[in-house]
Image (tube, coloured by chain):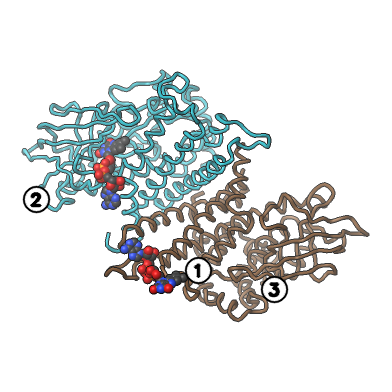
Chain colours: A cyan, B brown
């Protein structure tokens, strides 16, 4: 057996022994996911155990170095882990902005102390992070942000407002973009800082979405004290950190294009088969088959991009391609899920629909092509950085 | 296995791209077309393909080939897509070679594989019968007769069938499909050359009481389906590679045009309406490339469900290449409609490759069935 085959066999055995039955099968909706943090909520005790055993092995962040609590796996080993988890339909042990976004940025830009302090608690799901980028006047034009940090010697005082801050009311810490030099050109006066959401002066106000849920907030900073040791990267060069983090965020959002049960099965459960064994809705069948082709091809594309990045064959801007395609794909998938569900999928409150889960999830996906930078912004980035078209 | 080419495969790609750019660029296709070449392909180029090791890319070394796999065949097919080069590669080096390697007797292999590898012989696979690819509904029959069989039926879209040195004919026998290696000069065979929209060639072949010996059978009587399907899937994956090559090249030319063509006092590539479409197309092409390489790798690995990976690749590459050539013509404006500009040639080639071995609808249906819907 090759090393990789041995690793696969061991991983399979370990997962069989350690992944609780409750944590297999698709997570039913957003709330069933495990987000960790000081005030973590778990659907069942098994979900807590699953997060903890995976966190101990570093397998919530399989490719991060062991010295920071990660799994220390090679890319090939991480692929094996992912495929073995898929094999038994294991749910993700931990959903985390720390793992998807902040961690990779810290690994690239953080000091040794910052990595030692923040990464292990992210891996173990102890601290939940939120992202303070967008402001009322700075959405697509993120670098136009106005939240300011005044230098007070060993610390800054931060004042301003963020908006659309996902889970700000549930998060323990925030990674935040602040303006540290108001006189510099807009990209060159921004810094990337970290602070505790329990710091005096931080308040949040949830905003209700079209799905009827409130996973994001307006976030206000009123004379908030931020320690200088919590600056990531260079002062006034936070845009570099912000962009690197966005690439990770975009890859993560893109990955939503490849989630959930195969749509053909969803439709068969709802609509049944005709006498020749085909979905009893020929027009929908065609659309679903085309979606499934795109989903399969997109999954392979994510894998290929990962391999290209590893082999240094592509620009980091390639994340915009995954973000754009994956988010549009996920929207299409939920449009078809609604069509397959028919009038059943319209129920908003019933027990049967688990409180309107299909409709609410469908509405939630509309944000996929907005959050993390809109589809139009991704297309601009591709045109400029990957195609080098003039005048962008 | 990483979803990128290995170093050796990259070298092969550079060799194939370099060779075709030098010896058979698009002007080669134009020359064959405009001179109404009697055969529609260059024998000389085919022999050079042999010398370069491309013609025998999947043929084992003991038969004079390079002994490589599907990925390498795909690399050559993609290069052919970029230059739109007419070549017996598909019919001979991919479809026929796969069948001969997998199922033929030692005598049959010795007779043909070295000649294909050398770029000397041209073989054609005759499967399709109606306007659409439906290999599960072959109507051509082979009835036992004398010490052999009598073939009756009509085939179409037989690549290079008008100049084939040997035909591989798929026919129905008592309980299954049988493959026959047939001399095209046998009595009862009529061959009509069909020049296609892309100036590549195929043939319609009618078989009327064509008597062949028992030793014309490739593999087992009634047992040809396995070898046929394996060849069709390799052909489909290579067609996907050819489609991505053609789509990618049409896109490259178009992006270049967007940078240079000026209207309203600036490069048309500055208009966001075109930038976004170009960016979308880039994304689709990258995704098609991933699906194509994955299918080829899976064929080489003999992976479970490799056939489904092939269908994903053929359908995706087909749709994407179709979008690429349509955008190419549209974004070129008036000149895109002229025969002088190459983009129209890409549009034509992609249409043919889309029909070849099952269009996107065929493969979507295959996937839906496999998915239980
Ligand atoms: C569910 C959800 C969760 C979010 N979570 C977070 C979070 O946790 N933290 C955070 O900081 N932010 C978060 N966001 C904010 C998100 O990043 C912004 O909404 C996004 O960047 C767009 O900004 P905007 O809403 O101001 O839209 P605008 O920038 O005002 O855009 C409006 C429209 O104009 C288009 N447009 C703008 N500029 C251009 C251009 N140059 N070319 C072409 N079209 C253009 C846009 O594509 C869009 O269609 C979240 C958003 C949503 C919906
Ligand atoms: C079959 C045929 C018959 C014709 N007959 C006649 C005729 O009888 N008489 C006559 O005078 N003309 C005729 N034309 C010319 C036709 O009107 C032009 O081809 C057309 O106006 C486009 O101009 P162009 O070819 O220079 O393309 P370009 O203007 O160079 O356009 C190239 C691409 O850029 C796009 N583009 C250009 N500007 C913008 C912008 N601001 N924003 C977004 N996209 C942009 C275009 O949509 C196109 O996709 C004919 C053309 C054809 C193909």
Residue at horizontal 77%, vertical 67%? B111
- Determine the image quadrant of residue A330: top left
Q: Secondary structure at mark 3?
A: loop
Q: State the image coordinates of residue A313 (x, y, percent, origin top left).
A: 40, 56
- From the viewer's perspective, tell me whether residue A237 is left or right of residue B32: left
The residue mark sitting in front, 1 or 3, is 1
Mark 3 crowd level (few <14, some 14–19, many ≥20, 10 Å Cα): some
Q: State the image coordinates of residue B279 (x, y, percent, origin top left).
A: 38, 56
Quarter holding ligand 2: bottom left
Q: Nearer the viewer, residue A362 or A105?
A: A362
Q: Chain of mark 1?
A: B
| Residue B305 versus residue B52 in the image, above or below | above
The residue mark sitting in front, 1 or 2, is 1
Q: Are marks 1 and 3 on the same chain?
A: yes
Residue at horizontal 84%, vertical 60%? B151
Count of picture labels: 3
Q: Nearer the viewer, residue B333 or B179?
A: B333
Q: State the image coordinates of residue A153 (x, y, percent, origin top left).
A: 6, 39
Residue at the left extreme, as displayed = A152
Q: Which mark is residue B344?
A: 1
Q: Secondary structure at mark 2?
A: loop
Q: Give the mark nearest the N terminus, 1 or 3.
A: 3
- Determine the image quadrant of residue A108: top left
Q: State the image coordinates of residue B133 (x, y, percent, origin top left).
A: 67, 55
Please identify the quadrant where the C terminus of chain A is shown: bottom left
Q: Give the residue number, with chain letter if any, for mark 3.
A: B120
- From the viewer's perspective, tell me whether residue A32 is left or right of residue A192: right
Q: CA distance from mark 1 to mark 3?
A: 32 Å
The residue mark sitting in front, 2 or 3, is 2
Q: Which mark is residue A183?
A: 2
Q: CA distance from mark 2 to mark 3?
A: 74 Å
| Residue A67 versus residue B131 in the image, above or below | above
């Amino acid at each position: 057996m090759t090393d990789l085959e041995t690793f696969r066999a061991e991983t399979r055995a370990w997962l069989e022994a350690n992944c609780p039955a409750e944590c297999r099968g698709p997570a039913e909706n957003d709330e069933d996911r495990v987000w960790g943090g000081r005030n973590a909520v778990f659907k069942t005790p098994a979900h807590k155990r699953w997060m903890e055993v995976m966190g101990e092995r570093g397998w919530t962040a399989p490719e991060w170095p062991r010295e920071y609590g990660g799994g220390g796996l090679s890319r090939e080993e991480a692929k094996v882990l992912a495929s073995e988890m898929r094999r038994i339909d294991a749910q993700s042990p931990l959903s985390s902005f720390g793992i998807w976004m902040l961690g990779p940025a810290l690994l690239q830009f953080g000091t040794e102390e910052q990595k030692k302090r923040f990464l292990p608690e992210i891996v173990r799901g102890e601290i939940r992070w939120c992202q303070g980028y967008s402001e009322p006047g700075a959405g697509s034009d993120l670098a136009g942000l106005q939240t300011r940090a005044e230098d007070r010697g060993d610390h800054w005082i931060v004042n301003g407002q963020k908006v659309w801050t996902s889970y700000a009311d549930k998060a323990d810490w925030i990674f935040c973009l602040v303006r540290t030099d108001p006189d510099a050109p807009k990209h060159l006066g921004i810094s990337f800082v970290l602070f505790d959401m329990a710091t005096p002066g931080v308040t949040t106000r949830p905003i209700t979405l079209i799905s009827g849920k409130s996973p994001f907030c307006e976030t206000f900073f009123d004379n908030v004290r931020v320690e200088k040791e919590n600056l990531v990267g260079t002062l006034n060069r936070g845009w570099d950190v912000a962009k690197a983090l966005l690439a990770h965020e975009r890859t993560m959002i893109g990955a939503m294009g490849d989630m959930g049960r195969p749509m053909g099965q969803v439709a068969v459960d709802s609509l049944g088969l005709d006498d020749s064994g085909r979905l009893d809705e020929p027009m929908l069948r065609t659309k679903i088959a085309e979606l499934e082709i795109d989903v399969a091809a997109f999954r392979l594309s994510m894998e290929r991009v990962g391999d290209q990045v590893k082999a240094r064959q592509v620009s980091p801007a390639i994340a915009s391609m995954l973000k754009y395609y994956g988010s549009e794909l996920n929207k299409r998938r939920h449009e078809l899920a609604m069509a397959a569900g028919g009038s059943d999928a319209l129920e908003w409150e019933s027990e049967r629909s688990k409180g309107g889960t299909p409709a609410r999830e469908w509405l939630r996906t509309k944000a996929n092509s907005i959050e993390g930078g809109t589809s139009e912004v991704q297309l601009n980035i591709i045109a400029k950085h990957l195609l080098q078209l003039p005048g962008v | 296995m990483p979803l990128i080419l290995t170093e050796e495969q990259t070298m092969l790609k550079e060799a194939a791209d370099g060779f075709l750019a030098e010896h058979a660029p698009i002007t080669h296709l134009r020359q064959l077309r405009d001179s109404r070449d009697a055969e529609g392909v260059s024998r000389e180029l085919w022999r050079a393909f042999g010398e370069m090791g491309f013609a025998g890319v999947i043929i084992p070394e003991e038969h004079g080939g390079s002994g490589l796999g599907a990925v390498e065949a795909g690399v050559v097919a993609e290069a052919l897509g970029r230059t739109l080069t007419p070549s017996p590669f598909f019919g001979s080096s991919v479809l026929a070679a796969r069948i001969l390697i997998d199922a033929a007797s030692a005598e049959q292999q010795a007779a043909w594989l070295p000649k294909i590898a050398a770029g000397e012989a041209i073989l054609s696979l005759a499967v399709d019968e109606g306007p659409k690819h439906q290999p599960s509904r072959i109507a051509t029959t082979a009835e036992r007769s004398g010490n052999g069989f009598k073939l009756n039926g009509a085939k179409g879209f037989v690549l290079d069938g008008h100049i084939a040195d040997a035909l591989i004919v798929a026919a129905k026998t008592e309980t299954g499909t049988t493959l026959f290696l047939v001399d095209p000069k046998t009595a009862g065979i009529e061959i009509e050359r069909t020049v296609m929209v892309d100036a590549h060639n195929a043939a319609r072949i009618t078989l009327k009481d064509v008597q062949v010996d028992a030793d014309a059978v490739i593999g087992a009587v009634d047992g040809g389906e396995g070898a046929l399907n394996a060849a069709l899937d390799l052909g489909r994956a290579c067609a996907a590679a050819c489609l991505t090559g053609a789509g990618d090249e049409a896109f490259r030319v178009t992006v270049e045009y967007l940078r240079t063509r000026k209207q309203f006092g600036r490069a048309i590539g500055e208009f966001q309406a075109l930038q976004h479409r170009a960016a979308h197309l880039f994304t689709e092409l990258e995704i098609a490339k991933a699906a194509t390489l994955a299918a080829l790798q899976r064929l080489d690995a003999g992976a479970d469900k490799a056939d489904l990976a092939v269908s994903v690749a053929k359908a995706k590459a087909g749709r994407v290449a179709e979008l690429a050539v349509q955008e190419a013509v549209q974004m070129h404006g008036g000149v895109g409609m002229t025969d002088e500009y190459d983009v129209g040639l890409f549009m034509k080639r992609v249409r043919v490759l889309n029909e070849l071995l099952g269009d996107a609808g065929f493969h979507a249906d295959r996937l839906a069935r496999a998915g239980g819907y």
